[in-house]
Image (cartoon, rainbow, N blue to C red):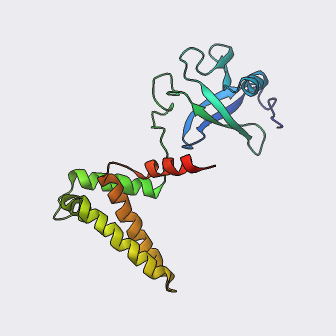
Amino acid sequence: MNIDFSKNTDGLIPAIIQDSETNAVLMLGYMNAEAYQKTMDTKKVTFYSRSKQRLWTKGEESGNFLNLVDIKNDCDNDTLLIQVKPEGPTCHKGTDSCWATENKTNYGFISTLEDTIQVRRENADSEKSYVASLFKLGINKIAQKVGEEAIEVVIEAKDDNDDLFLSESADLLFHYLILLQAKGFKINDVVDVLKSRQK
């Protein structure tokens, strides 16, 4: 890897730390050539501390190490993206990241939809909210709806109307997310099972 440590007069380049599983950005540190080499040798992320004026392995005092998974160099060869498996919180203040954000997998709109379902379940009027009304009817009704939507997906899969197939697929996924929460789970729990089956 061709890293240009000479671009800055202090020989330091930014190192962005990202969780290799959740893709969450955890912190920003700085590396010189020596810190980079120590990181490669030990597989524990090591920075050059500008305040301590020395090499500093993250976790050397707290035990919250950043275990190296992968390093990518940017297009100008002067910024690193370092993917890690963190042991414990990354920030010295005890938070998952240095921006006090939670280090969890985010599935974009699916995660937003899960949050909406949870809010409706906990706070919405069952006479005004379809989601709240399903939770009020109970697990049997929710499971029945998932079954009905699954059958409709199968029916549409055999036809040539892609719009209807996608619409029924969306209905199935939506009701499945509701069923997961009715059982006390979220989509990430299912993803964990799938990961455990990967060979």
Task: Say left or right for 13 vs 59.
Answer: right
* Residue at image coords 33%, 55%: 116
Task: Say left or right for 164 vs 57.
Answer: left
Asked if one can make out residue 10 in the rendered structure from this viewpoint, the answer is no
Pick the front one: 99 or 158: 158
The picture places residue 130, in percent across and down from the top left corner, at 24, 65
The picture places residue 114, in percent across and down from the top left corner, at 37, 54
- The mark tally for this picture is 0
Asked if one can make out residue 86 in the rendered structure from this viewpoint, the answer is yes
| Quarter containing the N terminus | top right
Q: Quadrant of residue 43?
A: top right
Task: Say left or right for 123 vs 189.
Answer: left
Q: Residue furthest right?
A: 2
Q: Residue furthest bottom?
A: 160
The picture places residue 149, in percent across and down from the top left corner, at 37, 72
Pick the front one: 113 or 41: 41
Relative to residue 136, is residue 79 depicted above or below?
A: above
* Residue at image coords 36%, 55%: 180
* Residue at image coords 45%, 29%: 95
Pick the front one: 174 or 7: 174
Relative to residue 170, is residue 161 depicted above or below?
A: below
Task: Say left or right for 68 vs 151.
Answer: right
Q: Quadrant of residue 19?
A: top right
The picture places residue 105, in percent across and down from the top left corner, at 49, 45
